[in-house]
Image: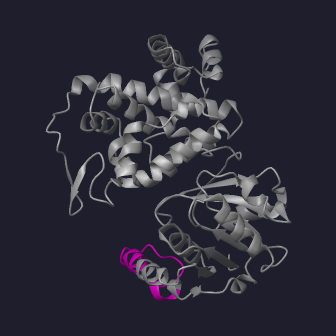
Amino acid sequence: MSGMIGVIGAGAMGSGIAQVAAMAGCKVVVTDSNPDSFTNAKAGIKQSLEKLASKNKLTSGSAEEVFGRISFVNDLNAFSDCELVIEAVIEKLDVKQAIFSDLEGRVSNSCILASNTSSLSIASIASSCKHKERVVGIHFFNPPVLMKLVEVIPGITTSRETVDKVYEILGTWNKVIVTAKDTPGFIVNKVARPFYGESLRIFDEGLSFPTEIDAAIKSLGFRMGPFELMDFIGHDVNYRVTETVFEQMFYDPRYKPSLTQRRLFEAGFYGRKSGRGFYQYDKGEVVDTSKKQPDPTNFQWIADRIICMLINEAADTLYMNIANRDDIDNAMINGVNYPQGLLKWCDQIGVKKVVEVLDDLYANYSEDRYRTCLLLRKMADDDQSFYN
């Protein structure tokens, strides 16, 4: 694949996408409203390429050759020969709409316009364009060079031809590609909400604490616990995604944000990047100030509650035709490093057991947050499984 790719935004995500495209053999042009960001982007890409080259993981030339395929420009007119332009800027709808409206007149009629949005409506972004059929969502995960997953999100006005062309282009980028309906959060950011939300609920109620909840989840094979991961992502990002999904899902209580996390966000305690979140960080090292020791006898009920809520969300995503079974499981494995797919995990636990856990939560709380997905209930009644 040697076509020209455009990237708008030279931050961590934009520069990462540019590097992925260049590593696939594409010529890439990158622009940013703040040209000063080019300095960090260039340094970051060079460092990443050199590290990959030292491990013999570059297959399309040396680090210098790959970097040479990337141009940093100040003028959107440089995108005129691109076959695909990917926008990766701040998650604000009006900003993205302005970019797409301006960009449309500067590229060829066949150029695909894509947004890397993680939670905004593709239909809303496309509404700023005259030719809405060529606007699509292409959502990478951070860091794009290391994370395998790419979610492709057709908007209601996106043409089949556009989707097919995107698959053709991305097919040479060494990525796992899944398709999601234009629904808040798409696959990963929708399905993953209980990983954070239910962990926060347990903490907010004083039933457990971050170190113990993280230990319980890591005992299942997760690389990071929910509180470690929220601190790693940053509460400025993680909280905002939760808030956006909650609002766009018409305030469904399943996605209700935590006031505890909101206070961290408001205080500027974003996690690793600010030196303090649920944990404190000294030169990047984690400092647990709680001095509490996790009790392994609590691990099972903590894990059951969080995993069953995740499975319920995955089942709902399948039931509502947002994505198919394999794409849901592949998305969670390759997008957020889950140890296995949630629907396959459900089969291992047993659908009836999952429904029992969810029904117990609903009986205790009487909150719609804990309602069992109709698909799971029907499968439990009929003794069915997802992979049989």
Q: Using the image, determine if residue 161 lies above or below residue 65.
A: above
Which region is colored magenta?
Answer: 47-65
Can residue 330 be seen in this snapshot? no
Could you tell me which residue is drawn at 72 percent across and 36 percent down? 321
Could you tell me which residue is drawn at 55 percent across and 27 percent down? 312
Residue 71 pos. (x, y %): 58, 87
Image quadrant where one finds the C terminus? top right
Residue 62 lies within the magenta run? yes
**280 or 71, nearer to the observer:** 280
Based on the displayed image, in which of its 4 quarters is residue 33 positioned? bottom right
Q: Using the image, determine if residue 249 lies above or below residue 107.
A: above
Residue 241 pos. (x, y %): 52, 48
Could you tell me which residue is drawn at 36 percent across and 78 percent down? 54
Q: In this view, does 138 lie to the left or right of 60?
A: right
Q: Using the image, determine if residue 62 lies above or below residue 115.
A: below
Q: In this view, does 154 lie to the left or right of 58?
A: right
Image quadrant where one finds the N terminus? bottom right
Residue 135 pos. (x, y %): 76, 62
Could you tell me which residue is drawn at 49 percent across and 18 percent down? 358
Residue 326 pos. (x, y %): 62, 41
Q: Which residue lies furthest to the left in this view?
A: 291
Coloring basis for residues: one colour
Can residue 357 be seen in this snapshot? yes
**198 or 350, nearer to the observer:** 198
Q: Is residue 286 left or right of residue 342?
A: left
